[in-house]
Image: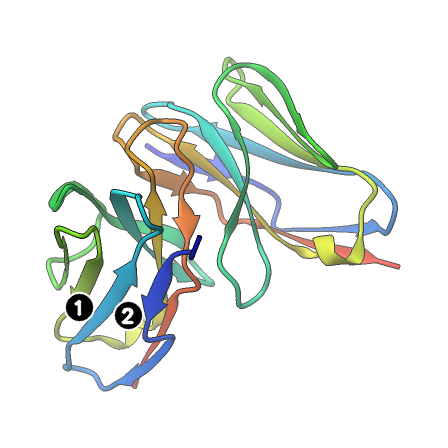
Amino acid sequence: GQNIDQPTEMTATEGAIVQINCTYQTSGFNGLFWYQQHAGEAPTFLSYNVLDGLEEKGRFSSFLSRSKGYSYLLLKELQMKDSASYLCAVRDNQGGKLIFGQGTELSVKP
Amino acid sequence: KAGVTQTPRYLIKTRGQQVTLSCSPISGHRSVSWYQQTPGQGLQFLFEYFSETQRNKGNFPGRFSGRQFSNSRSEMNVSTLELGDSALYLCASSLDRGPNSPLHFGNGTRLTVT
């Protein structure tokens, strides 16, 4: 079956670091994506991992371990505007199809 | 470069009616996918089109259908609407079907069925 798990909610403080975890069990694997979605807006692409290891992009980093079926998104120097839902998605072997987790609602407090 | 454009933004329909949603991908993008987003189920894959051909279909009933035109624009249709079809319908485009091609989403069409 296809299953992607991530925490439902997280709270963090402005200026801090937060790690959002994602575990997956899918029939195929062709890469893992992270998206950010603000309320009422479209999901926007943050990162892509297909090989094990860490990908860094400014304040955001994403890590992948294929053997463990595990990824995390690391957000540094949190800002209020980072309050949003963060979606983990796996591309299986079938072209453009992405399988999404339920999303993690992150609240950044002052 | 203009992003993915979806029309209309909001739609209210009655049970039993049908609806057509439209999506214009980013210029040059040839793959278009459709997703349904609800609070309970999250983002669920509906279908994917590339070069006017359906390449993938999700686990939705036959009332949900779509098509892609030669200019890559896409439409999806839902017939015999049910209350449970109320959702945000998101269209996404990508350059091609390569594994590292991210999806770029439109702002969606919010469908309410009464």
Left or right: B39 as drawn, with respect to A82 = left
**Residue appearing at x 26%, y 42% in the figure:** B31
- The residue closer to the viewer here, B31 or B2, is B2
C-alpha distance separating marks 2 and 1:
9 Å
Left or right: B24 as drawn, with respect to A50 = left
Kindly identify which chain the residue marked by label 2 belongs to: B
Question: Does B102 appear above or below B18?
Answer: above
Q: Which mark is residue B85?
A: 2
**Residue appearing at x 52%, y 63% in the figure:** A41
Q: Position of residue A26 (x, y in %)?
A: 37, 28
Q: Position of residue A5 (x, y in %)?
A: 52, 38
Quadrant occupied by the N terminus of chain A: top left
Quadrant occupied by the C terminus of chain A: bottom right
Amino acid found under the numbered disc labelled 2? Asp
Q: Which mark is residue B78?
A: 1
Kindly identify which chain the residue marked by label 1 belongs to: B
**Residue appearing at x 30%, y 36% in the figure:** A96
The local crowd at label 1, few if under 14, some if 14 to 19, many if 20 or more residues have their Cα within 10 Å, is some
Question: Does B46 appear above or below A69?
Answer: below
